[in-house]
Image: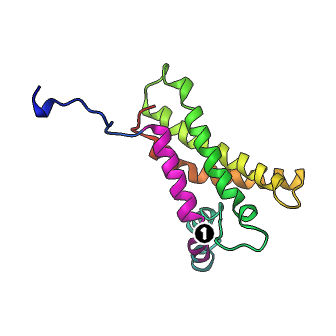
Amino acid sequence: MALTNRPRTVPRYGTAAGTGTLAAFLLVAVGGSPMYGDWAQGSTDPTGAGGWFLRLLSWPAWRWHADEGLLTTNLRAILLLVVAAALLYLLPGPQVDRVAASGSQFLSGWGAYALAGGITALLATLLGPHGTLFAAFQAASGGVTYGFFAGWIVGLASLGGRA
């Protein structure tokens, strides 16, 4: 066998769920960082669409130092990554056999992130200090809004990967 005909042991592209999870991690790591959140609050116009969107990207805010405890403060960011990864791995499964189009991967990634945002906000509010069901429902609407408007980035990252 010639050296140029070696079988590939490492795939050229990652899975759609893996690349979507990486995009979700980058959204939370960069968009939720204290530095980005401070910049978005101080440098963008909240009355314009662009400023509103840039502020929305800081929704899964996390902090290095917290008075109430590190886990309590960062629960939303941690849960968002866990739930998004789980949904990205679970949602495309039934579609693999029926649809091989990349539109399915895009919509699965986008929908998984929107759903992860809502579930995360609901759970983080209920599990956090002073969590009520009413506050959890209100927070879920904010989480779904974040997931809907930021989820297209995860959907685009899911394109081109193996299902």
Quadrant containing the N terminus is top left
Q: Looking at the image, is 151 positioned above or below residue 68?
A: above
Identify the residue at image location x=61%, y=72%. 34
Instruction: Please tell me whether the stretch drawn in magenta is mainly helix, strand or loop.
Output: helix
Q: Is residue 114 magenta?
A: no
Could you tell me which secondary element the residue under label 1 belongs to?
Answer: loop
Q: Looking at the image, is 41 positioned above or below residue 55?
A: below
Q: Give residue 97's position: percent from left, percent from top.
A: 48, 19
Out of 153 and 24, give the one closest to the viewer.
24
In the displayed structure image, the side of residue 132 where residue 122 appears, left or right: left
Q: Amino acid at mark 1?
A: Gly
Residue 109 in view of the camera? yes
Q: Residue furthest top?
A: 98
Q: Residue furthest left?
A: 2
Q: Give residue 152's position: percent from left, percent from top.
A: 53, 48
- Residue that badge 1 annotates: 48
Count of numbered badges drawn on the protein: 1
Residue 114 in view of the camera? no
Identify the residue at image location x=61%, y=50%. 81
In the displayed structure image, the side of residue 140 where residue 44 appears, left or right: left
Q: Looking at the image, is 155 positioned above or below residue 56?
A: above
Q: How is the image coloured?
A: rainbow
In the displayed structure image, the side of residue 103 where residue 65 appears, left or right: right
The image quarter containing residue 108 is top right
- Stretch in magenta: 15-38
Identify the residue at image location x=73%, y=55%. 142
Identify the residue at image location x=57%, y=53%. 150
Out of 104 and 120, give the one closest to the viewer.
120
Q: Give residue 65's position: percent from left, percent from top.
A: 68, 74
Label 1: few (<14), some (14–19) or many (≥20) C-alpha neighbours in 10 Å: few
